Image: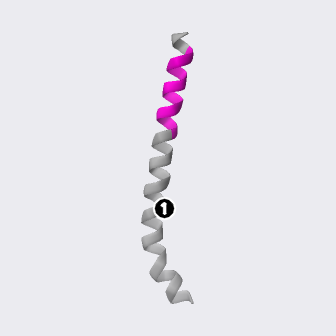
Amino acid sequence: MHGIIESLSPEHGQIDWKWVGSVFAFYVVLMIGGAGALLAH
C-alpha cells in the first residue's frame, strides 16, 4: 500500500500544482478584469 502511494504521489503532485496554478491565474485575471470594470464605471 505504501509503495503504491509513493509511486502515485509525485505524478499527482505535479498535475495538482499545474491545475492549482492555472486556476489561480484564471482567478487573478477575473479579479483584475472585475476591478477594471468597476473602476471604468
What quarter of the picture does the C terminus occupy?
top right
* Residue 26 painted magenta: no
What's the residue at 44%, 73% (across, down)? 10
Q: Nearer the viewer, residue 3 or 30?
A: 30
Q: Amino acid at mark 1?
A: Asp
Mark 1, secondary structure of its residue: helix
What quarter of the picture does the N terminus occupy?
bottom right
Q: Main secondary structure of the magenta part?
A: helix
Q: How many labels were placed on the picture?
A: 1
Relative to 12, residue 16 above or below: above
What's the residue at 51%, 86% (across, down)? 4
Range drawn in magenta: 27-38
Residue 40 in picture, x, y percent from top left: 51, 11
* Residue 33 painted magenta: yes
Number of other residues with Cα within 10 Å of mark 1, as a class: few under 14, some 14 to 19, many 20 or more: few
State the scheme by which the image is colored.
one colour
Occupied quadrant, residue 39 = top right
Relative to 12, residue 20 above or below: above
- Which residue is labeled 1 in the image? 16
Residue 37 in picture, x, y percent from top left: 52, 18
